Image: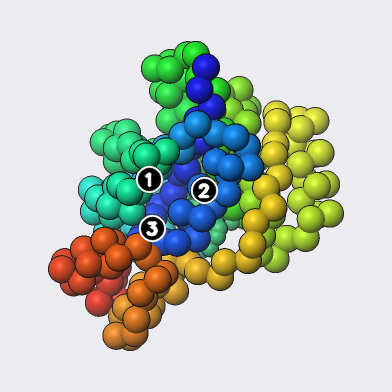
Amino acid sequence: MARIGIMGGTFNPIHTGHLMLAEWAREGAELDEVWFIPTGTTYMKASLESASAAAGMPGRERLHMACLAVEDNPAFHCLDLEVQREGRTYTYETLEQLKERYPGDEFFFITGADCLFSIENWRYPQRIFQCCTLIAAVRGEYTLPRMEEKKRELEMSLGRVILLPFPAVDISSTEIRRRIRQGRSVRYLVPDRVLDYIKEKGFYREESI
Ligand code: NAP
């Protein structure tokens, strides 16, 4: 039985914070592999700005950047199953699909702190927790006591949660897009291969994406 981390994200674009989170989770939860799954047509997202940003960048391009980002790490893989799916993509569907395909494996859904506080409002949270343990990074505006309280609450109603100590890495896809639009450097914020691809394609120079 393998322990598989699932790193879902809009990844518009994927950046060093995402990769570090996956690596910290791999080590902290003793995962054998981490599978990166870029979202397809986006669901609800707290920030409308981000939702429209994802809508403006085709899934296949976000997927390609994610694949470039993980290609030098043998424990990291990139899956196209959400980008390939017709209609909206929901996490419960992805996890149920993975459980069905790989019944012997154990899944861990890796998220930042925000998701810990919003996952109850996602589509069918019970079904999500039936398929996986949630790994949430302790980061951002959320303090450890607040996250521990939320973990207890979720564990009473939904399922297992692991809190992952994580250094503050103040990088966001929104900020990366903004910097590119302003003609500023994003070197080291994204892997070099992703940066080369962004430059080659001229991504994020316009306001709409
Ligand atoms: P994203 O913005 O690309 O971020 C991906 C993940 O990386 C998030 O968990 C985010 O944590 C974390 N992250 C971002 N910047 C980070 C940094 N600097 N350091 C450490 N971690 C960082 O993707 P997203 O749009 O939030 O989506 C995340 C997943 O949630 C996707 O798989 C999506 O399908 C799923 N989702 C599902 C539903 C649903 O099924 N109804 C609803 C919403 C989201 P934070 O959460 O803390 O930003």
Q: Which residue is mark 2?
A: 23
- Which numbered disc, 3 or 2, marks the residue that appears first in the sequence? 3
167 is higher (above) or lower (below) than 86: below
In terms of secondary structure, where does tag 2 sit? helix
Give the answer, above or below, for where 105 lies relative to 137.
above
**Residue extending furthest toward the left:** 200
Q: Nearer the viewer, mark 1 or mark 3?
A: 1
Seen from the viewer's position, the closer of residues 15 and 204 is 15
Q: Of helix, strand and loop, which one carries label 3?
A: loop
| Some atom of ligand 1 lies within 8 Å of the CB belonging to the residue at label 2 | no
Q: Residue at x 15, y 68 (%)?
A: 200
Q: Badge 1: few (under 14), some or many (20 or more) residues near its Cα, within 10 Å? A: few
The image quarter containing residue 196 is bottom left
In whole angstroms, how far apart are the C-alphas of marks 1 and 3? 15 Å
Q: Label 2 sits on what residue type?
A: Glu
Left or right of 185: which side holds 2?
right
- For mark 3, what is the residue? 14
Q: Is residue 124 above or below residue 139?
A: above
Pinpoint residue 67: horizontal percent, then vertical percent: 29, 47
Labelled pair 1, 2 in contact (Cβ < 8 Å)? yes
Residue 111 vs residue 41, the one in the foreground: 111
Q: Residues within 10 Å of mark 3 (few under 14, many from 20)?
A: many
Q: Residue at x 59, y 52 (%)?
A: 112
The amino acid at mark 1 is: Asn
- Tell me which corner region of the image, top left, top right, bottom left or bottom right, holds residue 39: top left
186 up-or-down from 77: above or below: below
Coordinates of residue 55 in the picture (x, y in percent): 31, 57
Q: Which mark is residue 73?
A: 1
Mark 2 crowdedness (10 Å alpha carbons): few <14, some 14-19, many ≥20: some
Q: Is mark 3 within 8 Å of ligand 1?
A: yes
Tell me if 61 is positioned left or right of 107 in this view: left
Q: Earlier in the sequence, mark 1 or mark 2?
A: 2
